[in-house]
Image (cartoon, grey):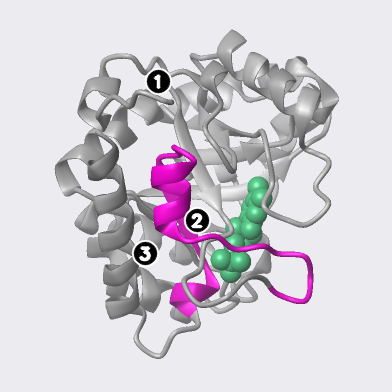
């Protein structure tokens, strides 16, 4: 049985600046809800961020799906994030060699290193991928989220691969904010933030391999820290009140395990 420390206690254990920031934010704002805003228009994304900003600790983007992406989108998103106190995490799933991910992170149209507080990384290329991020991360005090497990059916991020991803995170705890995972494994320790996608109240999955659990199940039974909800919120008729429901269930699941 896992023994859980509070987010407040874990602030002092975290060594990545974005992890420190996120633990503090969750403790003070009392929310462990992240929302995946997989919408394709700038105005829709910004309107949703404004509507649910008060309820969330993180907003997750897929910036390469935004049809009318421009610098103003980033400026506005950052100002909404500052106003409502949440972090922005770009789910880019970098996976190339260190030298290439450095370019992908710091250059191109999106300039991700300039605005994202966190980015996702597949460790399939080996631990040296992390060296490609170090300069960019330092400039912003950002952190990496290593994919230790995935929510999708038939995922190959399992078993020994998962163990190796945990080891990669521990060896690079300065750069790593946490793990994307479906359960807390003992080896993950208390200094990383554990985030879980594949969350929805009223669905078991979609027709493209996604699999869903409830907030209560992953936070209380599986021991992860943050739920990531996409369609369950942004496709609802009333995203704000739906966000409040997810927030309440995941926060009370968190409190009940302490
Ligand atoms: N996402 C997953 N599963 C994963 C990882 C990322 O669903 O294992 I890593 C992303 C994909 C999508 C969001 O942006 O999280 C989940 O959206 P829905 O709640 O709409 O399924």
Q: Nearer the viewer, residue 162 or 20?
A: 162
Q: Is label 2 in a helix, a strand or a loop?
A: strand
Q: Which residue is mark 1?
A: 190
Note whether residue 63 is visible. no
Q: Residue at x 56, y 16 (%)?
A: 187
Q: Earlier in the sequence, mark 2 or mark 1?
A: 2
Q: Which residue is mark 2?
A: 60
User: Could you say which quadrant of the image residue 193 lies in?
Assistant: top left
Q: Residue at x 66, y 33 (%)?
A: 148
Vertical order, 246 against 169 (above or below): below
Is the C-beta separation of discs 2 and 1 under 8 Å? no
Q: Position of residue 154 (x, y in %)?
A: 83, 52
Q: Which mark is residue 223?
A: none
Between disc 3 and disc 1, the foreground one is 1
Q: Nearer the viewer, residue 252 or 45?
A: 252
Does residue 23 belong to the magenta stretch?
no
Task: Locate the C terminus by quadrant.
Answer: top left
Q: Nearer the viewer, residue 89 or 101?
A: 89
- The magenta region covers 206-234
Is label 2 within 8 A of ligand 1 (CB to nearest ligand atom)? yes
Q: CA distance from mark 3 to mark 2?
A: 15 Å
Is the C-beta separation of discs 3 and 1 under 8 Å? no
Q: What is the residue that sits farthest to the left in this orientation?
A: 28
Which quarter of the rendered image does ligand 1 occupy?
A: bottom right
Q: Which residue is mark 3?
A: 76
Q: What is the residue that sits farthest to the front in this orientation?
A: 1
Q: Position of residue 88 (x, y in %)?
A: 43, 50
Vertical order, 66 against 198 (above or below): below
Q: Earlier in the sequence, mark 3 or mark 1?
A: 3
């Amino acid at each position: 049985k896992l023994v859980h420390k509070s987010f407040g206690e874990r602030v002092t254990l975290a060594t990545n600046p974005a992890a420190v920031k996120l633990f503090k934010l969750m403790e003070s704002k009392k929310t462990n809800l992240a929302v995946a805003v997989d919408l394709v228009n700038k105005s829709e994304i910004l309107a949703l961020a404004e509507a649910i900003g008060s309820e969330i600790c993180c907003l997750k983007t897929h910036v390469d799906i935004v049809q009318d992406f421009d610098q103003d989108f980033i400026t506005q998103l950052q100002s909404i994030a500052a106003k409502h106190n949440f972090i922005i995490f770009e789910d880019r799933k970098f996976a190339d060699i260190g030298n290439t991910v450095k370019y992908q992170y710091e250059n191109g149209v999106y300039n991700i290193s300039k605005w994202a507080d966190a980015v996702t990384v597949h460790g399939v290329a080996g631990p040296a991928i992390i060296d490609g991020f170090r300069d960019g991360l330092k400039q912003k005090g950002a952190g990496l989220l290593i994919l230790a497990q995935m929510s999708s059916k038939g995922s190959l991020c399992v078993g020994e691969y998962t163990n190796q991803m945990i080891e990669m995170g521990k060896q690079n705890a300065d750069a790593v904010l946490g793990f994307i995972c479906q359960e807390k494994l003992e080896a993950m320790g208390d200094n990383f933030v554990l985030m879980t996608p594949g969350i929805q109240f009223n669905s078991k999955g979609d027709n493209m391999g996604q699999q869903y659990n409830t907030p209560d199940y992953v936070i209380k039974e599986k021991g992860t820290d943050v739920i990531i909800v996409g369609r369950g919120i942004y496709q609802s008729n009333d995203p704000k009140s739906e966000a409040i429901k997810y927030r309440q269930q995941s926060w009370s699941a968190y409190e009940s395990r302490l």
